[in-house]
Image (cartoon, grey):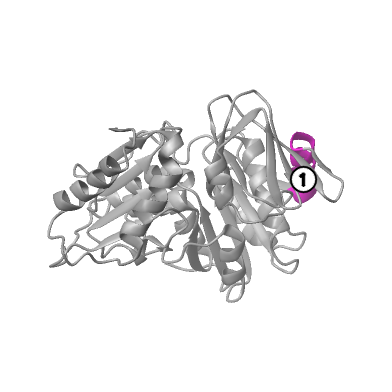
Amino acid sequence: MIIISNIRIGLLVHGSGIVDTGYAKIIYDLLCDYGVVTAKLGGTMGRTAVLDAHLEDVIDISEKLLPSQSIEILSKQNDVIILINHGKSMITGHSFGYRVYKNISDDIKLLQIERPQADDGKIIKWSNSFDEKLLSYLSSKLSLEVISSQDAIKLVCDESRIANDGQIIKRRIADVSPDENIMINGVIVGKVVSDELIIVSSNGRIVDFIGGVAYDEALDRLQRLDLTKAIVKTGLLRKADNVNPRHLTHNKNDTLKVACLDTSHIDMYDYCDNDLIVTIGDDVTLMLSEIFYRFDIPVIGLITGKLDRIVEKSFIHKQSLIIKIDEKDFKTIKFKVKQLFNSKTVHENLNDLSETKDEVLSLLDSMDAEYEIA
């Protein structure tokens, strides 16, 4: 193989869609024929997609970072950065790229390849100065039109109007449908109930969804944010219905090792040596049960039943236990379960999974909690 150039290319693969369509591998191979490529992933469900596609040796999934953080890291050792994504629509894909672009340093040369499999796919030249030979090469090989950052920004601003008086920010989210999940910076915080959604923040806190319903528990987990720069998504995290989940071998510990988590903002590799994951919260349970299925690790999940699903086709370990708890009891039970498990990760007195399940259910019974096995 003859490499066309010695240019160093940082490739940021965002989300599961671009992996599931097969274009992450196609674009990676095209770039490897052109220059020297380093690839990293951005996005939680994208990690499972990379695992399922057996691409973890070429796309680095070892760190859980925001897209802008991954770009900053890649930019230190590469001449150009190429962001590849397959958004729900052209509008959402362009909007995502614009938010990322606003969150990175001005001197980074950034190109976005958006929805390359779709009829409305585009290459967005976010930086004015870019290697024109590389640009022409990708446009020709992928049969995609190149548009300027000005064209992309105009589309985004027309569709995602932002009103900002310094304290109150109102941001319209384009291309939404009723019953879709609302995710802000990786946390599912509510559900769409209309054909239009406006998110309102005050002094860095989300205070209202016009056209949506908020999940107060989830909003409590959100850190202060600049709504004008936040990454907002609606709908499913992984849409592919032909997923073939990877099955990795799990070596069990001599004594059951348990981790208790109430956030999905984790590095999954930090917990793969556990034999059981206790998850607290709907989105956390749905997301982590999907992830740890690949590592042959069951979960005990506590949910209220607000979320129907987060992926088109989901998987859960056959030994998992999902407990639906009445919302009025949830905060108290959450506190008690965290007390039970967070004091020590390893339970020396528990030798198997069934004993741990019995301990959780006994705790709920002792509190006279209303629950059902989901």
Q: Quadrant of residue 175?
A: top right
Quadrant the N terminus occupies: bottom left
Seen from the viewer's position, the closer of residues 358 and 185 is: 358
Q: Secondary structure at mark 1?
A: helix
Magenta-colored segment: predominant secondary structure: helix
Seen from the viewer's position, the closer of residues 190 and 294 is: 190
Numbered circles on residues, count:
1
Quadrant the C terminus occupies: top left
Q: Residue type at mark 1: give it.
A: Ile
In the drawing, does residue 360 fall left or right of residue 33?
left
Q: Residue at x 80, y 45 (%)?
A: 168
Q: Residue at x 43, y 53 (%)?
A: 262
Measured from the top left, where is residue 92 in percent x and y?
Answer: 63, 39
Can residue 162 be seen here? The reply is yes
Q: Is residue 152 magenta?
A: yes
Q: Residue at x 15, y 52 (%)?
A: 355
**Disc 1 target residue:** 153
Magenta residues, as a range?
A: 148-160
